[in-house]
Structures are given as C-alpha cells and as structure tokens.
Amino acid sequence: MQNCELVYAQTQKRNNWGQKRQSARPKSDWIRQSAPDLQIVSDQEWAAAHTRIAAARAVYMKATQGQPFGRPKLGNPSKCLLTNLANCSACGAPFLVLSRKHGNGRKHVYGCSAYHERGTCDSRRTVPTTDADLVVIEALLDDVLDESIVRDSIDEALTLLRADDGSAEADRLDTEIAAIDGEHPRLMAAVASGCAAK
C-alpha cells in the first residue's frame, strides 16, 4: 500500500431479509477510492519502514522458535540490572554502564548514555551500579515479589489448570517451581552482586 485509498462497503448492516445483522462483504464488492492527499509519507519511506518491520518480525520469530508470543532476547544483554530498563530523568535516554579505575580494580557506575556517548544531555551524574541495583531489588522484594502474593497466584493458576484437565501441565509446573525454590538463594546472590563479575 504505497498510495492512500479509502475503502467503503466492507461490511453490510442488514441481511437479505432486512434484519439488522452486520456481516463482512466479499472483497469484490468493496468500493475503493484513491486519496493521494491523505498520504503523509513518501513511497520510499513506506517501503523502507515495511522492510524494517519484516526484518524485525523475522528476528522475533527466530528468537521464539517460530512461536508468535514471548519476548526475544535482547541483542545487547548486560550483566547489570538497570541497563535497557532505566532512563535518565533529565532527557529520557537509557542508562549505560561505565567502568572506572578504582584502587586496584574497576568501579562500575550507571550514567546517561546521551551525555557520555553523544554529549546531548546536561546530566553528568552517575550512581554506583551495586547501590542502584540493591535499591531496586529491595523495592521489588518489599512491594512486588511478596512471597505470599506470588505463592497464592501460582496456587490459583495450578488450580485453574487442573480444572481444565491440564493436570500433566500443572504437575510439570510444580516440578519447575520446586527447582526454582532451590535456585532462589543462588540467584538472589548473583543479582545482588551486580556487575562484580564483569
């Protein structure tokens, strides 16, 4: 669709007996009218955008093994919690992780990517990654990941699965939950360590 057009008569509101019953009309009955004055992008821009959309769709479907759901992995994963999640309060640009010499080792801090990479933001403030990560983790544990809420939600989901004759799936989820419960302390320690492994 490079040229704008208006399409009429895609549906009919009444059936053959005059009763109100909306239904789709065959495409051969549609009335099309060209409307070039409504076009807001050039043909070249339209083609480029849809080429980009098709490429992104192909990457997405490959990342989800052909399933049209789920979130594909980020192309630039980070070992730090807030990378790709938090933004600069001054300009809205994403945080990046900066590494600085600190004693005999390295110190990692979050900073505004627009300031440090392009110089287009005035915010030169940085915050140690471990401090920022711990604040976020504590807030999640206190306000979001309350164990009783999570456990109640899981129990309710398992009850619904079993009611829908999904007993095998529910049993599989029970096994996974037990494994996650065993991994929980190790995962929390890894997240709390922030970028120390970098």
Image (tube, helix red, strand yellow):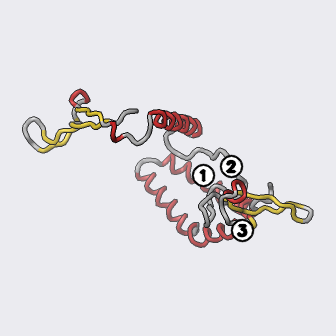
Pointer 2: what residue? 77
Q: Could one spot residue 196 in this view of the protein?
A: yes
Expressed as whole percent of the image width and height from the top left, the position of residue 152 reads: 51, 65
State left or right for residue 54 relative to residue 28.
Answer: right
The answer to whether mark 3 and mark 1 are in CB contact below 8 A is no
Q: Amino acid at mark 3?
A: Arg
State left or right for residue 135 relative to residue 23.
Answer: right
Q: Amino acid at mark 1?
A: Thr
Work out whether residue 72 or residue 30 is closer to the camera in this orientation and state it. Answer: 30
Nearest to the eye among marks 2 and 3: give it: 3
Expressed as whole percent of the image width and height from the top left, the position of residue 149 reads: 53, 67
The answer to whether mark 2 and mark 3 are in CB contact below 8 A is no
Nearest to the eye among marks 3 and 1: give it: 3
Estimate the spatial distance between the alpha carbons at disc 2 and disc 1, rounded to whole Å: 28 Å
Expressed as whole percent of the image width and height from the top left, the position of residue 191 reads: 71, 61
Pointer 3: what residue? 125
